[in-house]
Structure formats: structure tokens, C-alpha cells
Amino acid sequence: MARTAMIHARTDAGLKAETGTILRSLGLSYTEAINLFLNQVRMRKGLPFAVEIPESVFISVIERGKRRFILKKSLRVRVGVEGGAWVYEYSPLGILAYGSTQEEARDAFTTEFASAWEQVGKEDDSNLTRDAKSLKKRLLSLVDRVEGA
């Protein structure tokens, strides 16, 4: 029998539950799945799949708190890493959001979007500057409806 070694790893509880269901449907335990992965790394002398940062993501629903912004069409949001920070950018609205992780950058993006909606999208035109009116017009052209509080 081959000598074994123990690996301890932490992962998101939701990810573990979701992948556990998938692995069981494939007839694999976590140990078997990890060994399969490690054998592929050894055989390929690298990861058995491409790991790359997408240049952009498409977002059709933006969730912030209890609100969901259902968009008329998906936004193509630029994603990148700059100076060690993750960036989500949608220049038509002037949103440039940063985070130390991709999730933090996406959360910052949704916060900026929701803030623009609250401060400009819902404001009466008489209280807005010309630039703010232009931003409001772009926001209204993107958002189909807002659900939640």
C-alpha cells in the first residue's frame, strides 16, 4: 500500500456543499477528486486547465443589499488587476471600482452602481447638473426595473 500524507484545506461552505453534490453524482469522494487533480498537475507539470483573468464580464442583474437592479441588457464590465488590486470598470457610467479580491471589486462596483441610482437616477431633474442629468439618462436607459427595498 502506498504511503499517504494528509492535506488540510479550507474552502467556502457553499462551495463545498455544491461541489459535494456534483462529486457524489460522479461517484467521487473529496479525497478521490483531490488525488485526480494532483495527478493531473503532476502529469501536465502545471494546472490541468487554463487560469486567466477575463478581460470583461457581462452583468445583467446587479444586487446590492435587498435591491436587485434588473437591466434591459447586460453590461460589459472591464475586469483587470492593476497595481495588485482588482478593478471593475464601466466607463459609460463613470464607475471604476477597486478591491483586494475580485469579489471585493465586484461588491465595490455594485455599491457604486446602487449609489449612482440613489443619488442621481431617482433625483428630480431640477436638482441635477447637466452632467448629472446625462448620467441619469444613461442609468434609466439601462435599468428595466428595481426589485426589493
Image: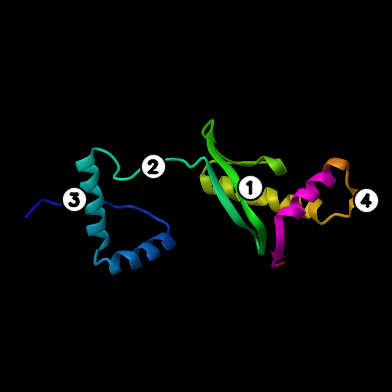
Residue at 33% over, 45% down: 49
**CB-based contact (under 8 Å), mark 3 and mark 4:** no
Question: Measured from the top left, where is residue 19 in percent x and y?
Answer: 36, 62
Indicate the position of residue 105 as horizontal and vertical percent values. 58, 45
Q: Which residues are magenta?
A: 132-148
Which marked residue is nearer to the observer: mark 4 or mark 1?
4
Position of the N terminus by quadrant? bottom left
Question: Residue visible at 66% across and 58% down?
Answer: 71
The front one of 60 and 4 is 60
- SS class, disc 4: helix
Q: CA distance from mark 3 to mark 4?
A: 69 Å
Of labels 3 and 4, earlier in sequence is 3
Residue that label 2 marks: 51
Nearer the camera: disc 3 or disc 1 = 1
Of callouts 4 and 1, which one flags the residue occurring earlier in the amino acid sequence? 1
Rounded to the nearest whole Å, what is the CA distance between mark 4 and mark 1? 27 Å
Q: Is residue 4 above or below residue 16?
A: above
Q: Spatial distance from mark 3 to mark 1, Cα to Cα?
A: 42 Å
What label sits on residue 126 in the rendered view?
4
Furthest residue toward left: 1
Query: In the rendered view of the protein, which quadrant contains the C terminus?
Result: bottom right
Badge 1 element: helix
Q: Residue at x 81, y 57 (%)?
A: 122
Instruction: Give the class, few, some or many, for how many residues have Cα within 10 Å of label 4's Cα (few <14, many ≥20).
Output: few
From the image, tell me which residue sits under label 1: 109
Give amino acid for label 3.
Ala
Q: Amino acid at mark 1?
A: Phe
